[in-house]
Amino acid sequence: MNMANIKENNNKQNRAASWLVLACVALLFIATCLVSSIHPALMIVLMAVMIFLLLATKIEYGIYLMIFFLPVINWNFSWHTLTAPFIDLLGLTVFIAFILQTIYRRLFDRANFSLRLPLFIPFILFFASVTVSNFLSQYIGGNIWYSIRWILFFYLIYVTLPVNIIKTEKILKNSLIAFMLSGLTVAVMGVISLFQQDWQYSLVRTLPIQLFGIYPIGDNHNLVGEVLIVSLFFTQALKYWSKSIKINRLLNILMIFQALVLLGTFSRAVWIALAVGVILFLIFAEQKSRGQLLVIITFCLLLLSPLSLYMYKVQSDFAIGGSSTASRLLMTEIAWHDFTLKPFFGWGSGQFENLLGADVRFVAKYGEPLDSHGVWQKVLAENGLFGAITFTGIFGSLIIIFYRVLKKYPGEIKLLLPIFLGGFCMFVVQFFNTSYYKGKLWLPVALGLCAINIIRKKYRKSQT
């Protein structure tokens, strides 16, 4: 056996061992959560073991797990008064492992130590505005905790952590594959849900399904669409590394499958986001990629006509579309009224539900108050004009960064454009939904920033 064959066998064995360790880490963390209600001390021990495994192998495995389990926002675990979903516990565990690794490098390997704080200036301006808002509010302690738990948490866990771990094309590619697999899993759940519904007497749409007595990704159709609107474009991005016609055809089939399940949610927000994403892709994409997408769009349009008629029926039914629209309009009216009362810094983070609960009209018509169905309603009411301006700064900074990079590196548009559109379309969805401070929005954004850093690094090396 020659040296090349020996090396290849060793690589295969190493890859197999790596995936085995990854599977063990995943199972260990699930076991950690399952026993969390039995004994907190045992949970801490198991989490410590998982952290050790991540440090002893490759910490990027934790990122792959975070990406795959990103939709799992409704598997909640409680300890005393604290409640956290599975994905946040997983993210916190990986973050602790990263901090320990960073401390070690800072002390013993300074030459290779580096720490990125992506979007730091726009984020710190937003967080400063939020902090002022909290100190001017009636419930200072609760509002500060909300800001730390949700706003600072998403920045550290779902933006800073991935950007500091995903530094090579290989890790980025594996991350996109993990996202695609997550999207396909959710899509399969959506298809299974069709066989669990009463086609004769109820509205039929692709929905989350129940597993082991819970709805792990939630029970709302929008939650299926939120995952697929990103994984659809990330599947397109994987063609950047593919030179095989067969693999490209397979990716096209997977995109069509995800697109059809996405359309089957009959979510207005997701349909709008998909339309925006497709239009932008056709405007900016290379001619070859544009042609491939047109083939997929043509196929989907053949099925879209009857779906459009069904969508019109759904949205014209007041009990479904009309009621949803009316509740959002009332939320917007309440948010605007409360904004006018405290226009500069708002009522404090986390107060939107209390503002709805104080409105007799909303409680009388819809019962228990909900969180805002639209990011701008929430930011304006809770953090006022300064909060809205600084949050817009984060969003605007992302657009400017991607536009400049796409213009500077047109040869990399095949990778950068679909990754950018995945994150951008998720922002569009959050104009109508409630995941504005969750990993489902910000981790795709982080993957886009990782892709930019990798492309810049590649071109710097080519110039030296």
Image (cartoon, helix red, strand yellow):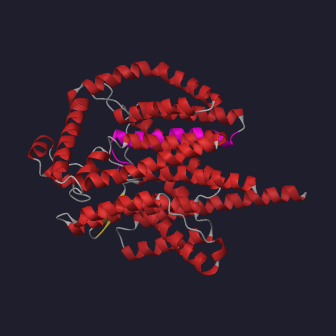
* Front-lying residue, 230 or 368: 230
Q: Is residue 20 above or below residue 44?
A: above
Q: Viewed as shown, does residue 131 lie left or right of 212?
A: left
What range of the chain is rendered magenta?
215-242
* Front-lying residue, 296 or 283: 283
At 45% from the left and 62% from the top, the residue drawn is 157
Q: Is residue 128 above or below residue 101?
A: above
Q: Quadrant of residue 319?
A: top left
- Queried whether the magenta region covers residue 139, the answer comes back as no
Q: Quadrant of residue 331?
A: top left
Q: Is residue 42 above or below residue 177?
A: below
Q: Is residue 46 above or below residue 116?
A: below
Is residue 101 visible in the rendered image? The answer is yes
At 38% from the left and 40% from the top, the residue drawn is 429
* Front-lying residue, 286 or 20: 286
Is residue 70 visible in the rendered image? The answer is no
* Front-lying residue, 63 or 12: 63
Q: Quadrant of the N terminus?
A: bottom right
In the rendering, at what x and y percent does residue 80 appear? Answer: 28, 71
Q: Magenta region, mostly helix, strand or loop?
A: helix
Q: Viewed as shown, does residue 286 lie left or right of 349?
A: right
In the rendering, at what x and y percent does residue 381 appear? Answer: 23, 51
Q: Quadrant of the C terminus?
A: bottom right
Q: Viewed as shown, does residue 394 lie left or right of 102?
A: left
At 29% from the left and 51% from the top, the residue drawn is 379
Q: Residue furthest right?
A: 2
Q: Quadrant of residue 432?
A: top left
